Image: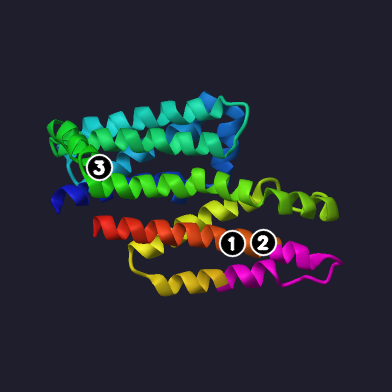
Amino acid sequence: MENSLILIQLLLAHIITDFVLQPTSWISHKRKHKGTSVYLIIHSLLAGVLTLLFIQRLDLWYLALFISVSHYLIDWWKLKQTEDNLKYFLLDQLFHLLILLLVWLYIIDGFSLVLPGLKSILNSPAILAIAGAYLIVVFPAGYLIGKATQRWQNEIEITYKKNSLEAAGRYIGIFERILVLTFILTNNFAAIGFLIAAKSILRFSDKSETGARKQTEYVLIGTLMSFAFTIILGLLIQALVF
């Protein structure tokens, strides 16, 4: 419990530093002045100070300093990128989290447990089966359903040209399959019905255009394929693992 508490404290210190105590004016100044921004320095020092406040261990001041310096370098790297997009945001947060993980392992003296922990995960049929199921619903399932509905998609595109967001349907399908699989593995079957109802309301609320029935049928076919595939996969995993 104490080890988990330390990790939560480190994460809270980071969240408050990066998302609560960083006004827009600081971000704008950082983007303009990059590594010489005084707000970047203050922001990085704040990461270390909050870490000390949360873990309440003044004897670990050097870890707080390590967090501040690494926070500065990671943010500086991000500011030097030509684009400020989702990819760099996720990489920035990943690097911060890796630093926090290293600090946490140092505090709890847990480095010796890393390799046995990884070995345990890789040798666990339950974990591997669940991880494999999520990979399947994200990647191969979308490809399979896309190929199965390709002829109807071509027919719809001829009628409607390009009237939707780029790859929107693919991402909607990925997220819905992740949700359905999660509901099944956690025995929340009723939530699947609410998901179907919500998607139906959003996708079929305005069908006044000529030929809209084809589009409705195409979306319905894809949705049913997606749900059926994921439900069957989820039930198989549940039968094998639980």
Pointer 2 and pointer 1: residues touching (CB < 8 Å)?
yes
Q: Which amino acid, mark 1?
A: Thr
Residue drawn where x is 16% and y is 47% of the image: 3
Instruction: Determine which residue is flagged by label 1.
Output: 223
Secondary structure under badge 1?
Answer: helix
In this rendering, is residue 233 above or below 56? below
In this view, the residue in front, 65 or 203, is 203
Instruction: Determine which residue is flagged by label 2.
Output: 219
Pointer 3 and pointer 1: residues touching (CB < 8 Å)?
no
Q: Which residues are drawn in magenta?
A: 197-217
Tell me if residue 16 can be seen: no
The answer to whether residue 207 is magenta is yes
In this rendering, is residue 188 above or below 146? below
Instruction: Determine which residue is flagged by label 3.
Output: 52
Compare marks 3 and 1 and give the one earlier in the sequence: 3
Cα distance, mark 2 to mark 3?
53 Å
